[in-house]
Amino acid sequence: MTLVVLDAGMTNLALPTIAGALGVSPAAAVLVVTAYQTALLVALLPAAALGERFGCRRVFASGVWLFMAASLLCAVASSLPWLVAARALQGLGGAAILALGVPLLRFSVPPERLGAAIGWNALTVALASSAGPGVGALILFHAEWPWLYAVNLPLGGAVLLACRLLPRTPLGSHRLDLASMALSGAMFAGLFIGAQLLPARPLLAASLAAVGLACLGLLVRREAPKAAPLVPLDLLRQRSLRLSVIASVLCFAGQTAALVALPFYLQQGLGQSPSTTGVYMTVWPLSVAVTAIAAGWLADRFSTAWLCAAGGLALAAGLVSAASWPPGEDVRPMLLFAAACGMGFGLFQTPNNRNMFLSAPLERSAASGGLQGTARLTGQTAGAVLMTLLFTLTPVGAASRLGLGIGGALALLAGLVSLLRARDHPPATGDAVPAAS
């Protein structure tokens, strides 16, 4: 997880440097990020299907190899098209890592310890997210931008050594449907790219979205009769898991909108310097890290529905408080609001993921991993597009405050959706353990 998350954080920081070194515009340099994200979203469900068929450990390790090879191509890239293509390959490898990482945890620990294991995973992701910009800045201070990708090689080597200790998982007997994989890729590519183009080129965006929706219809019709469909329709028929997926999309959309809006609000609304803004922004992921372990422990002992509801409420309270803080006042309380946001998100994420994985049969763990990753990226894309539209239609100051408020509303809605699961299982036993037996 550190390999993938650290790479993303360093790349985001280095975009201006990469644009200058390759002689391209900032808008063109953003393709370095969108190519990776598009490939990641397109490949999540196919990677999960490959994991079910050939074993999670084998496909996970193959993803690490691909990620490392693509990192080497990024490091020697001499033009933007080369770098964008290499980043797309990185996304394909990263999809296998993100889709199968948590399912491998499920095969590593007993069900009653899965919440704690997911908490440690969330801690790792939060710390890597916090460290990414700092590590990237340190590398750029001492070396050229290609070294941002070269450092993935020794780190990836350590990951491959650790892969030897991962558990072997059952192999599937079903045949892979390449046509369904192609339809899935076209669906996500159409919807994702269409969403990115919506503010600037709405007609093209609508056309791409229509193609994506048509592919979705064909894919559902093709996959519905299967026992183990590529798009996990069998899992989505389970009420508890379906509600967890919906809540995940809402919460990630609210979090992403807020993380985009908050720096603008701090700098342009409250008059803070970029360095001070960086300090305020760091409090959020550090609070997620602090909360993750406790959230994992709680998720193994109490109803995840109520924990997710409490997390959504805390995140919403932090965002609404930040949005309503008047300009000209002491900004130090914003540290408390950011901490509340991080604690709320940490309290939501780990229990929600635990319920999502334990609501699926053991043999469909890889599919639930792909579904969890898809829900996360869908929410993140929706939050980013929302902020792009707000910045296009309204002044920056109003857009940032409105984005924080809408993010709070989405977080609150995620908590309320989670509460619909409260009656599924008794709070004393957790709401998903029986499904794993």
Image (cartoon, rainbow, N blue to C red):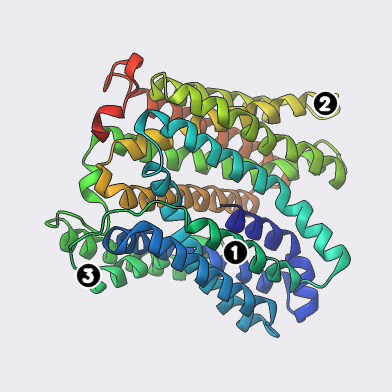
Q: Quadrant of the C terminus?
A: top left
Q: Disc 1 marks which residue?
A: 156
Q: Neighbour class for label 1 at 10 Å: few (<14), some, many (≥20)?
A: many
Q: Which mark is residue 47?
A: none
User: Real-space Cα distance between discs 3 and 1?
Assistant: 30 Å
| Quadrant in the picture for residue 243 | top left
* Amino acid type indicated by mark 3: Asp
User: Real-space Cα distance between discs 2 and 3?
Assistant: 55 Å
Viewer-closest of 34 and 371: 371
Q: Secondary structure at mark 2?
A: loop
Is residue 30 among the parts visible in the rendering? Answer: no
The residue positioned 79% from the left and 69% from the top of the image is: 17
Q: Disc 2 marks which residue?
A: 332
Direction from residue 165 to residue 82 in the image, left or right: right
Q: Which mark is residue 177?
A: 3
* Amino acid type indicated by mark 1: Gly
